[in-house]
Amino acid sequence: MATVFPSNQGIVLGGGLAGVSAANTLLENGARVVLLDKSSFCGGNSTKATSGINGAETKAQKAKGIDDTIELFTSDTLKGGAKKPEVVKVLCGNSGIDVDWLVEKFNLDLSLVARLGGHSAPRTHRGAERFPGMTITYALIQMVEKIAERTDKARIVTKARAHKLLTNSAGACVGVVYEKGGLDFQEHGPVILATGGFGADFTQNSLVAQYRP
């Protein structure tokens, strides 16, 4: 988290799979969370994924006798063109326990394991659904929604466009300013940026508008 001070509320910007994963992790660890998304509903680009989610050394792989390792997944990812080895190490190193977390925490079926292009072993997990990205992401959204309905531990604010990070005198991020309905609001606490890339920038001056109108 981009902060250096104690806080019992985490702020997550972005309601795609990364954002709702972060929100659920905060809740699991006893924090309050406010999730902000500029769209009218959560889900983001993650809901469009049709292949599945990759993981090495998962329980599903072991149950099927699939011989895969984190080291092999890391090697495949670097060969595929990844430019930041330190990020790849985290991505691949956590991939197996992350897939198991989705299965065990959210009761998802990810028992079908396939080998896709660029992979040296079957490690792409999905269930029988046609759109696994949608199935996975919505399960995590629904968990946050359920907690928000029953307790004060979680809040989801949609149509909320974050436009400024608040910092203290030491330069640490201590909150965010967002616009909703023409008015500015503030939330205070550590901020997790899960806003994705430029693909969801729908403004007139966006990179998408400039290069792929």
Image: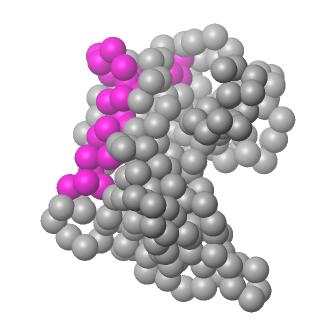
> Most extreme residue toward the bottom, as rendered?
169
Q: Is residue 198 magenta?
A: no
Q: How many marks?
A: 0
- Write down the region rendered in magenta: 122-146
Picture coordinates of residue 16, whole percent (x, y)? 46, 42
Q: Is residue 208 visible?
A: yes
Picture coordinates of residue 169, whole percent (x, y)? 74, 88
- Please report the residue visible at 40 percent of the width from the left and 65 percent of the height from the top: 34
> Most extreme residue toward the right, as rendered?
83
Q: Quadrant of residue 91?
A: top right
Nearest the eye: 96 or 36: 36
- Please report the residue visible at 56 percent of the width from the left and 70 percent of the height from the top: 176
- Does residue 118 appear to the left or right of 43 in the view shown? right
Q: Is residue 127 magenta?
A: yes
Nearest the eye: 14 or 119: 14
The secondary structure that dominates the magenta segment is helix
Nearest the eye: 204 or 70: 204
- Does residue 108 appear to the left or right of 189 in the view shown? left
- Does residue 109 appear to the left or right of 158 in the view shown? left
Q: Quadrant of residue 210?
A: top right
Quarter holding the C terminus is top right
Above or below 60: residue 168: below
- Does residue 48 appear to the left or right of 154 in the view shown? right
Picture coordinates of residue 178, whole percent (x, y)? 51, 64
Q: How is the image coloured?
A: one colour
